[in-house]
């Protein structure tokens, strides 16, 4: 949809603003808001009371409040590019600024203007992004007449609500696709591809019935007996840059299964763990931290080693490794392993439990067919997920562009808001 422009413009004198409507002013942000520091809340924290706000919204409650009224919250440290608009009594943390809205300003318009601040440009620290009160206060923005500010804010409220609704629909679709993928994996791995196959009790409560001609096998029986399931280096030390590549738990995902993403340790540290070295085609399973990720080892990682966060699962020659991977990713099997996870600070799966987890096991030709079917279905669902994610990106870009265009006067929304239903 295209929007009308104002009949007359003038040069704003500010490079990034360009031309603005002729009857608008260009002012520093401090003429909209008076910026104040947030404060530590620990001495007033409790289970209920006034909301304590950070960049992500409410995360606890306080027995007292810093301010009672309309305010725009701005990031001071950490997440600095997530302004919030709030009303009523609240407390905000010391990594945020809160503001008093000027009498001649619309709080909602000030909020939308804050969304256009180039936070990356003003940030004073690359390690921990930080904003100064001075940089925020002196940032130039447009100031339409107050009634027009209110109209623009109303227009943006309406339009962003529509866009946010479309984004929410795409996110729901992604969740449904994720659930569908899990259901496809679970059913194929535990029930097979033949809906008419005779079934028998598996003898395992969480597994239920399996096809009559299948076995239920401990994972260790599906692996190469000469290369048992094991984890690797316990204390790999710091990354030495040019040493032996080591795969950590956080690397067990397609985008990080490469040499460029891996840390390295010295040959002296790695040598005692030579039995845990990887071969192309092995499976690696994350057993600490992010539990349950499972990926095949690519050729470029042949000869690499693993840390104690990862288990190597070397599949026997007469077993389909792609099928075993899908079996280990099946929700029921992952849940069974996770239910016995250990560790208070960092959850983990015991190698003993991983070796003995029950895998419903069809004949080898059926293993290959199941793996091929899940591969095919997963690719379709992943493509739909990627399309949904792309749609979200485009919608978010449109939202950002619409806000910027409205608060800088590149579109005239006055007639549009007047025509909108109450």
Image: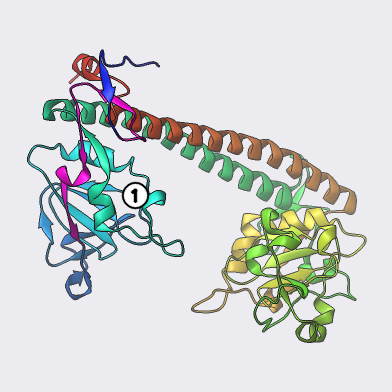
The quarter in which the C terminus is drawn is top left
Q: Is 253 placed left or right of 276 in the picture? A: left
Residue shown at 15% from the left, 43% from the top: 31
- Residue 164, horizontal then vertical, whole percent: 37, 34
Report the magenta residues as a range: 14-37
Q: How many marks?
A: 1
Does residue 273 lie above or below 378 as drawn? below
Label 1 neighbour load within 10 Å: few <14, some 14-19, many 20+:
some
Q: Mark 1 falls on what kind of element? A: loop
- Does the magenta run of residues contain 195? no
Q: Is 350 placed left or right of 388 in the picture? A: right
Residue shown at 30% from the left, 27% from the top: 406
382 or 185: nearer the viewer = 382
The quarter in which the N terminus is drawn is top left
- Residue 147, horizontal then vertical, whole percent: 12, 26
Residue shown at 84% from the left, 66% from the top: 222
Does residue 376 lie above or below 358 as drawn? above
Q: On the image, which quarter does residue 68 sit in? A: bottom left
384 or 134: nearer the viewer = 134
Q: On the image, which quarter does residue 58 sit in? A: bottom left
Q: Residue furthest right?
A: 317
- Residue 368, horizontal then vertical, whole percent: 85, 48
Q: Which residue is mark 1?
A: 82
Residue 108 visible in the snapshot: yes
- Residue 306, horizontal then vertical, whole percent: 74, 73
Residue 53 visible in the snapshot: no
Q: How is the image coloured?
A: rainbow
- Does the magenta run of residues contain 24? yes
Does residue 173 lie above or below 70 as drawn? above
Residue shown at 65% from the left, 60% from the top: 293
Q: Is 376 placed left or right of 93 in the picture? A: right
Q: Is 187 placed left or right of 338 in the picture? A: right
């Amino acid at each position: 949809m295209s929007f009308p422009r104002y009949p007359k413009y003038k040069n704003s004198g500010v490079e990034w603003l360009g031309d603005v409507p002729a009857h608008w002013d260009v002012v520093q942000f401090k003429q909209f808001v008076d910026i104040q520091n947030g404060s530590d809340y620990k001495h007033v924290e409790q289970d209920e009371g006034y909301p304590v706000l950070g960049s992500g919204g409410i995360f606890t409650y306080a027995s007292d409040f810093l301010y009672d009224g309309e305010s725009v919250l701005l990031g001071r440290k950490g997440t600095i590019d997530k302004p919030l608009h709030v009303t009523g009594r609240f407390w905000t943390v010391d990594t945020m600024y809160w503001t008093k809205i000027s009498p001649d300003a619309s709080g909602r318009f000030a909020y939308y203007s804050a969304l256009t601040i180039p936070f990356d440009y003003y940030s004073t620290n690359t390690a921990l992004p930080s904003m100064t009160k001075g940089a925020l206060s002196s940032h130039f923005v447009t100031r339409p007449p107050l009634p027009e500010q209110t109209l623009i804010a109303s227009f943006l409220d309406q339009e962003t609500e529509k866009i946010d609704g479309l984004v929410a629909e795409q996110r729901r679709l992604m969740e449904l696709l994720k659930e569908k993928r899990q259901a496809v994996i679970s059913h194929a791995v535990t029930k097979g591809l033949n809906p008419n196959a005779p079934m028998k009790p598996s003898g395992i409560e969480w597994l239920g019935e399996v096809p009559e001609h299948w076995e239920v096998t401990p994972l260790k029986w599906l692996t190469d007996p000469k290369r048992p399931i094991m984890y690797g280096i316990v204390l790999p030390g710091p990354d030495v840059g040019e040493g032996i590549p080591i795969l950590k738990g956080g690397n067990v995902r397609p985008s990080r299964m490469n040499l460029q993403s891996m840390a390295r340790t010295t040959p002296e540290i790695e040598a005692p763990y030579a039995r845990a070295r990887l071969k192309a085609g092995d499976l690696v399973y994350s057993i600490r931290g992010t539990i349950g990720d499972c990926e095949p080892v690519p050729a470029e990682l042949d000869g690499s080693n693993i840390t104690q966060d990862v288990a190597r699962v070397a599949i026997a020659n007469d077993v389909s490794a792609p099928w075993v991977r899908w079996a280990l990713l099946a929700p029921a099997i992952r849940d069974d392993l996770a239910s016995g996870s250990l560790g208070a600070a960092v959850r983990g799966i015991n190698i003993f439990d991983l070796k003995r987890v029950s895998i419903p096991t069809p004949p080898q030709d059926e293993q290959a067919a199941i793996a091929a079917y899940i591969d095919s279905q997963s690719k379709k669902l992943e493509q739909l997920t990627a399309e949904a994610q792309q749609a979200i990106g485009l919608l978010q870009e449109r939202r950002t562009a619409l806000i910027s265009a409205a608060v800088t006067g590149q579109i005239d929304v006055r007639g549009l808001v007047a025509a909108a239903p109450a």
